[in-house]
Amino acid sequence: MTSPQIELEHVDKHYGHFHALKDINLEIGKGRFVALVGPSGCGKSTLLRSLAGLESITGGIMKIAGETMNGVPPRRRDVAMVFQSYALYPHMTVKENLTYSMRLKRKSREERDKAAKEVAEITGLGNLLDRYPRELSGGQRQRVAMGRAIIRHPKAFLFDEPLSNLDAALRVHMRKEIRALHDRLGATSVYVTHDQVEAMTMADHVVVMREGVIEQAGAPLDLYDHPANRFVAGFIGSPAMNFVEATTTEAGDAVVLEGFDGAVLPLGIKLAPGRRVVAGLRPEHLLLGAPDKSAIRIGVGVVEFTGAASYLSSAGEPELTVFHAGRTEVRPGEAVGLTIAPQHVHLFDPETGRRVEG
Ligand SMILES: Nc1ncnc2c1ncn2[C@@H]1O[C@H](COP(=O)(O)OP(=O)(O)O)[C@@H](O)[C@H]1O
Ligand SMILES: [Mg+2]
């Protein structure tokens, strides 16, 4: 087995008394695309900047390509960062921006021109080499920023929310472009984003962070199917999972939901009787049906249409959100029934938030 390209062992980072990264352990294999995702302030940028050497860690070990990086200055780490702000030199043309790192290394003009042409080809900047950043669109500037990283043949690409400045359509497009580039270059990429859809669609491996801690790491659909705790369950998936307090029945093979007239949901597993749990129900797993034939009855509060889908919210507490593919005739004020398959009922411990399994 080849050794991982990036290894983090018990990494800690303090800013004074503030503990920004808490015992981070992570291995990233060569050629992998890993997303670090979590709410604003959870430590994603701190982790990425520590990898790049822009921050020093206060505990643990960081390795890149098998070499310990603690104390190694950024320019010797051989990683390339791509930021949201592009950080292009405004007084330099695209070509000069792309080849700036080569000029610092005193590469010849011929070598620089050749490399610029190659990278421009890869990033689709071929006919823009003589333009200045101000003459480029946001997407083109982002490509220059990536081209500048590519030209250095780094051991890893580190992306910090590179698409946040782009409009929604361009973001979706650039998402695919970055992933395709990664594949074509056989690169190792660490990609920071607060957007779980971006993380899920781009990465092979998603690392969910909260308050300086890794909450769960795994393949995108594993996180969706088996969230390890209530935080990950609520963070991955859109609209977010519904949470309802519940108690297991005498037989332990079903739960009684609180606040829905004694609605009972069968489970695929068996638990202790009378156990208090939190049931997690994804909006897309709640199926609309007739009130008298369904487990859960709700009064409809709001119905929203996007054309492709309908979103219903219940009027009462706790509020439930339902995702219905396509259109519905249901209108606010009506009563509807909801069913959910046993295997789609997630359970969490009310105190620890941990996933409960049979
Ligand atoms: N230089 C600093 N000094 C003190 N606290 C900092 C510094 N940089 C970041 N932090 C704090 O560390 C936490 C994580 O920040 P950051 O890694 O930027 O979060 P994210 O990128 O996930 O939004 C935040 O609470 C932030 O306020
Ligand atoms: Mg950040």
Image (tube, rainbow, N blue to C red):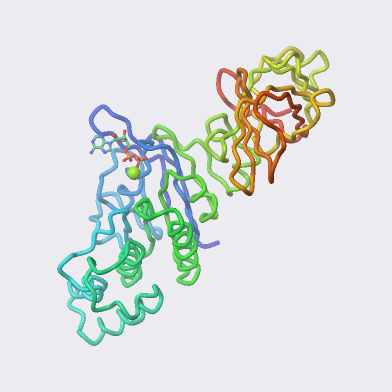
Location of the C terminus by quadrant is top right
**Horizontal side, residue 88 vs residue 218: left or right:** left
* Residue positioned most to the bottom: 110
Judge whether 210 appears above or below 174 on screen.
Answer: above
**Horizontal side, residue 228 vs residue 210: left or right:** right
Judge whether 131 appears above or below 338 on screen.
Answer: below
Which residue is at 47% across, 62% downward?
Answer: 173
**Horizontal side, residue 331 vs residue 273: left or right:** left
Judge whether 113 appears above or below 56 on screen.
Answer: below
**Frontmost residue, 127 versus 208:** 127
Residue 325 percent across, percent down from the top left: 68, 44
Figure quadrant of residue 322: top right
**Frontmost residue, 251 versus 256:** 256
**Horizontal side, residue 196 vs residue 120: left or right:** right
Figure quadrant of residue 287: top right
Which residue is at 66% across, 19% downward?
Answer: 277
Which residue is at 37% across, 51% downward?
Answer: 164
Location of the N terminus by quadrant is bottom right
**Frontmost residue, 12 versus 39:** 39
Residue 106 percent across, percent down from the top left: 17, 77
**Frontmost residue, 332 versus 246:** 332
Query: For the image shown, how many numbered marks are present on the structure?
Result: 0
Judge whether 354 appears above or below 95 on screen.
Answer: above
Ligand 1 quadrant in view: top left
Residue 192 percent across, percent down from the top left: 40, 49
